[in-house]
Amino acid sequence: MSIINRSDLKPGVRVSIVQKADQKTGRLTDGVVQDILTSSATHPHGIKVRLVSGEVGRVKSIRKPT
């Protein structure tokens, strides 16, 4: 899995995240970034974001626009 850089993210980008409660199962949640919560450039487990829906998790992939 490739590491997502903070510079790749900005509000409005569609992403797939894993929420804290879903870390064991790896269940992904799709949504649109509202806020970037991680201040460092990278993080080994993924950059933490808040989605427009209010869900918080670590980015596992950036979704292609449809």
Image (tube, rainbow, N blue to C red):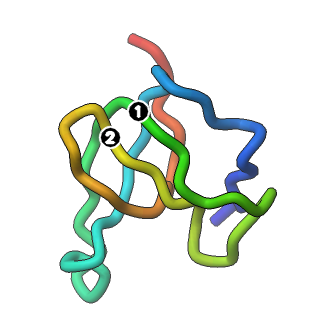
Residue displayed at 51% across by 26% down: 11
Q: Secondary structure at mark 1?
A: strand
Q: Secondary structure at mark 2?
A: strand
Q: Nearer the viewer, residue 43 or 63?
A: 43
Residue displayed at 28% across by 58% down: 28
Q: Nearer the viewer, residue 64 or 19?
A: 19
For the residues labelled 2 and 1, say whether their Cβ atoms are less than 8 Å apart. yes
How many C-alpha atoms fall within 10 Å of the one at disc 2: few (<14), some, or many (≥20)?
many
Residue 45 to residue 47: above or below: below
The residue under label 2 is: 51
Q: Name which of mark 2 and mark 1 comes first in the sequence.
A: 1
Residue displayed at 46% across by 51% down: 49
Residue type beneath disc 2: Leu
Q: What's the CA distance linking mark 2 and mark 1? A: 5 Å
Task: Please identify the residue farthest to the bottom as the structure is shown.
Answer: 24
x, y (%) of residue 54? 22, 44
Dividing the image into 4 quarters, which one contains the N terminus?
Answer: bottom right
How many C-alpha atoms fall within 10 Å of the one at disc 1: few (<14), some, or many (≥20)?
some
Dividing the image into 4 quarters, which one contains the C terminus?
Answer: top left
Residue 9 to residue 24: above or below: above
Residue 48 to residue 12: above or below: below
x, y (%) of residue 51? 32, 40
The residue under label 1 is: 34
Q: How many marks?
A: 2
Image position of 8 (left or right of 10): right
Q: Which quadrant of the figure has residue 8?
A: top right
x, y (%) of residue 22? 22, 76
Residue 11 to residue 42: above or below: above
Residue type beneath disc 1: Gln
Image position of 47 (left or right of 60): right
Image position of 55 (left or right of 62): left
